[in-house]
Amino acid sequence: MDLDLVINPDWSQRRQNRCAAFRFLFQWEMNPTENLSEDLNEYLERLEGEEEFFTYAIQLVDGIIEKLGIIDSIINELVDNWEFSRIAKTDLALLRVAIFEIKYRLDVPPIVIINETLEISKDFSSENSRKFLNGVLDKAMEQMNRPTRKPAI
């Protein structure tokens, strides 16, 4: 797995933003720093995209960090027979993005969030990880009682 890959330019802007948020969160998890905002700006500059292009990634990262305790608590409840600390860091970063979107981004249908997460995971996780992610996200969607294929707002 190479997290230094350029984000796939063939992906939609939204998927590129999700991927940027996931990759930043993965790196932050491995090496947390005091100045998250500055680090995020530097990271996005290295991706060589316009700041406006990555607005959604910034919203995701800011929201996830703000709600990290709640999101991690939800993930911990969803993973049966699995220690939270044993979740692969790539899977954890993907789950954090997806759980945040399912819970707080009511403008995005959960089925889209799950599909996007699984598509991104193809470049960064194993087949077993995709099965794990899919199972956890299906349970999350059921627990949060949202319409599957429509925005909630």
Image (spheres, grey):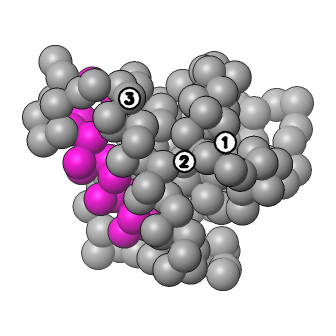
Q: Residue at x 34, y 37 (%)?
A: 141
Reading the image, the residue beneath label 3 is: 143
Disc 3 secondary structure class: helix
| Quadrant housing residue 105 | top left
Reading the image, the residue beneath label 1 is: 40
Q: Residue at x 55, y 39 (%)?
A: 78
Residue 113 is one of the magenta-drawn residues? yes
Magenta segment: 105-121
Disc 1 secondary structure class: helix
Question: Of circles 1 and 3, which is in front?
Answer: 3
| Quadrant housing residue 37 | top right
Image location of residue 121, percent across then percent down? 48, 69
Reading the image, the residue beneath label 2 is: 95
Helix, strand or loop: magenta stretch: helix
- Precedes in sequence: disc 1 or disc 3: 1
Q: In this rendering, is residue 37 above or below 115?
A: above
Q: Is residue 105 left or right of residue 109?
A: right
Question: Of circles 2 and 1, which is in front?
Answer: 2
Q: Is residue 33 left or right of residue 74?
A: right
Q: Is residue 119 left or right of residue 88?
A: left
Image location of residue 126, percent across then percent down? 56, 79
Q: Answer yes or no: is residue 48 visible.
A: no
118 and 34: which one is in front? 118
What amino acid type should be assigned to the residue bearing mark 1? Leu
Q: Residue at x 61, y 33 (%)?
A: 77
126 and 47: which one is in front? 126
Instruction: Tell whether label 3 touches label 2 (CB within 8 Å).
Output: no
What amino acid type should be assigned to the residue bearing mark 3? Gln
Q: In this rendering, is residue 140 above or below 115?
A: above
Outermost residue toward the left in this view:
150
Residue 15 is one of the magenta-drawn residues? no
Image location of residue 58, percent across then percent down? 51, 36
